[in-house]
């Protein structure tokens, strides 16, 4: 026991002695070699990259635990940060990829900071400028104007719009099929054609929707080529019809090239790109309109179609989802294109669309009101109330698009033949909707009374031989509309009744009187004093029509009277 204690004492004394000796002679842990690095480039002060990458080479001995590299790039022209990378590096020569770096006609100032992972005080910093030598959506040059802009683009008070479902309009389901039917569309009295999206459709997560855009500057190869699109526009112009195209600004396909610029898209808390909030649209990625580069790229794409295909404007999808400030910026830019009078329709109901520069937005409330009157026997006066409320909510001179169907309603709800109670009801609803006020819209297939729903995801050709009498009536209605200042822009007087819609429109000496029974039953209208015992001409038959003190109407009967 004594021996063990003695040994322990000696060992302790030896350790203490060694510690004292060490402290007197050497030292601390050796300092690792000071970091030194360089940017690998022919011109270290300025890197021009064609693949969005650059290299940093560590010249000193690499620290044992490696280094942390932090690279921050800031636009030289406006000071905005465009990329930031943090990466752990263990090798002397490391390549860095700028995954969200769209500029190529300006420079970014890069700040590089290398920090030893074993000694936070061992730091190297360097600065240089960088640009990409490949074109980006922001900086691509605008094309020259193709063709001659249409000089007689219709104003909204003279407009009849026709929505083209390209996949259904013809057996070929392409742009040539639209070209082949231009004469039939013109014969309806149409002077503005709206083409549903013409762009390539996304493949990743797709459901086949044309509103899932893979390339804003491309033509869906199933539809044809840019040359076909130019031909279509030129042929429409030669017939006095303007052409607008559907524009999907709110979101893109997941395989749109823009997806490489992650900051152009809305993200969740974990940095994942998300679908549009409040929707179940899994096939599309939501764009972030707080990103100024994305806005500029979108505006360039809009201008591309005006310049390179000579289109006359845009129907802007889901316009209520997109902020006012972008629409104002975009429309202000479009208005600077010389010799253009562009038509701009917002699919939405916000009043600020008009302040941004749109001439038209959707009459959704009116559509809901007329459906409820026909389907649910609501009071016919609700149609007048809704009409007044919609126009009181928008600036004077602005217009509502009025319709009894469109691609969404005919695909997901039902066609007018079902909603409004058959052929006569569908025509009656169209007369009220088109003549009460606003810009009338026809959707391909409604003029021949398609009964079944109509997909816009798949090729479902319309039977143009159906209901020839209905087609003839639509032609007569819009021939009358185009010839009548009163129907298009006359002063409106309404005569309320529970079951019959009755209104008069007057322009100068021209008077047009519309009487329409909205019930699938006989109705009798007691005529107000202003209309009782007056003489008119039936505008569709040219026969004299004398009114007494009341008028009996069969189910869904309508009269269009003039004097």
Image (cartoon, rainbow, N blue to C red):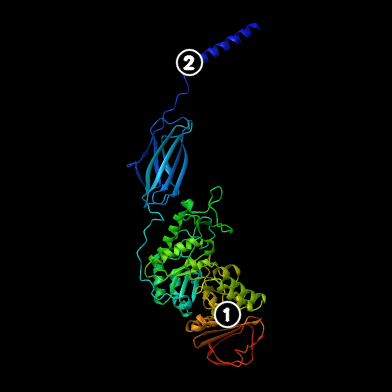
Rendering quarter of residue 492? bottom right
Is disc 1 placed on a helix, strand or loop?
helix
Q: Position of residue 390 (x, y in %)?
A: 57, 72
Q: Position of residue 81 (x, y in %)?
A: 44, 48
In space, the residues marked 1 and 2 are separated at their CA atoms by: 104 Å
Q: Nearer the viewer, residue 388 or 279?
A: 388
Q: Residue at x 53, y 62 (%)?
A: 209
Q: Would residue 466 be seen by someone viewing this image from the given angle?
A: no
Sort mark 2 into few (<14), some (14-19) or many (20+) by Cα contacts within 10 Å: few
Q: Nearer the viewer, residue 492 or 117?
A: 492
Q: Earlier in the sequence, mark 1 or mark 2?
A: 2
Height in image: 517 above or below 13? Answer: below
Height in image: 169 above or below 43? Answer: below
Extreme-left residue of the structure: 42
Instruction: Tell me the tag on residue 322.
Output: none
Extreme-top residue of the structure: 2
Of circles 1 and 2, the one toward us is 2
Tag 1 and tag 2, C-beta contact below 8 Å: no
Question: Which corner quadrant holds the N terminus?
Answer: top right
Sort mark 1 into few (<14), some (14-19) or many (20+) by Cα contacts within 10 Å: many
Q: Position of residue 115 (x, y in %)?
A: 45, 35
Q: Position of residue 435 (x, y in %)?
A: 54, 80
Is disc 2 placed on a helix, strand or loop?
helix
Height in image: 524 above or below 367? Answer: below
Height in image: 320 above or below 36? Answer: below
The residue indicated by pointer 2 is: 24
How many numbered marks are there?
Answer: 2
Q: Would residue 252 be seen by someone viewing this image from the given angle?
A: yes
The residue indicated by pointer 1 is: 432
């Amino acid at each position: 026991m004594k021996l063990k204690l003695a040994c322990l004492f000696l060992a302790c004394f030896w350790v203490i002695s060694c510690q004292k000796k060490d402290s007197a002679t050497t030292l601390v842990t050796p300092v690792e070699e000071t970091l030194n690095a360089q940017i690998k480039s022919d011109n270290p002060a300025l890197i021009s990259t064609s693949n969005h990458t650059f290299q940093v080479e560590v010249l000193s001995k690499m620290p044992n635990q490696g280094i942390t590299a932090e690279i921050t790039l800031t636009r030289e022209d406006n000071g905005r940060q465009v990329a930031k990378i943090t990466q752990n590096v263990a090798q002397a020569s490391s390549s860095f990829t700028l995954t969200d770096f769209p500029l190529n006609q300006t420079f970014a100032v890069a700040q590089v900071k290398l920090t030893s992972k074993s000694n936070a005080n061992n730091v190297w910093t360097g600065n240089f400028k960088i640009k990409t030598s490949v074109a980006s959506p922001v900086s691509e040059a605008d094309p020259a104007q193709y063709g001659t802009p249409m000089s007689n683009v219709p104003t909204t008070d003279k407009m009849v719009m026709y929505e083209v479902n390209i996949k259904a309009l013809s057996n070929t389901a392409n742009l040539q099929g639209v070209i082949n039917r231009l004469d039939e569309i013109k014969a309806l009295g149409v002077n503005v054609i709206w083409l549903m999206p013409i762009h390539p459709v996304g493949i990743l997560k797709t459901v086949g929707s044309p509103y899932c855009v893979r390339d804003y500057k491309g033509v869906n190869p199933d539809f044809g080529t840019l040359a076909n699109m130019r031909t279509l526009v030129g042929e429409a112009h030669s017939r006095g019809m303007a052409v607008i195209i559907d524009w999907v600004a709110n979101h893109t396909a997941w395989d749109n090239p823009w997806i490489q610029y992650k900051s152009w898209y809305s993200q969740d808390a974990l940095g994942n790109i998300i679908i549009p909030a409040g929707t179940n649209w899994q096939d599309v990625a939501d764009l972030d309109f707080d990103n100024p580069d994305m806005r500029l790229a979108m505006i360039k794409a809009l201008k591309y179609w005006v310049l390179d295909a000579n289109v006359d404007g845009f129907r802007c999808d889901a316009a209520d989802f997109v902020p006012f400030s972008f629409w104002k910026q975009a429309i202000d830019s479009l208005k600077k294109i010389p010799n253009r009078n562009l038509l701009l329709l917002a699919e939405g109901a916000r009043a600020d669309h008009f302040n941004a520069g749109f001439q038209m937005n959707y009459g959704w409330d009116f559509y809901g009101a007329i459906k409820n009157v026909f389907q649910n026997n609501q009071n016919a006066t609700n149609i007048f109330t809704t009409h007044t409320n919609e126009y009181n909510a928008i600036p004077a001179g602005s217009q509502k698009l009025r319709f009894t169907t469109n691609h969404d309603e005919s695909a997901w709800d039902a066609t007018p033949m079902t909603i409004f109670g058959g052929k006569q009801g569908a025509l009656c609803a169209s007369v009220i909707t088109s003549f009460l006020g606003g810009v009338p819209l026809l959707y391909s297939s409604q003029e021949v009374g398609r009964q079944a729903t109509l997909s816009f995801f798949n090729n479902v050709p319309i039977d143009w031989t159906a209901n020839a009498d209905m087609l003839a009536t639509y032609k007569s209605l819009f021939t009358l509309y185009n010839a009548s200042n009163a129907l298009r822009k006359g002063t409106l007087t309404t005569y309320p009744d529970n079951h019959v819609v009755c209104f008069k429109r007057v322009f100068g000496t021209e008077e047009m009187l519309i009487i329409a029974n909205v019930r699938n039953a006989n109705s009798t209208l007691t005529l107000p004093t202003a209309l009782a015992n007056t003489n008119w001409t039936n505008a569709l038959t040219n026969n004299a029509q004398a009114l007494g003190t009341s008028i009996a109407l069969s189910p869904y009967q309508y009269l269009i009277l003039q004097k």
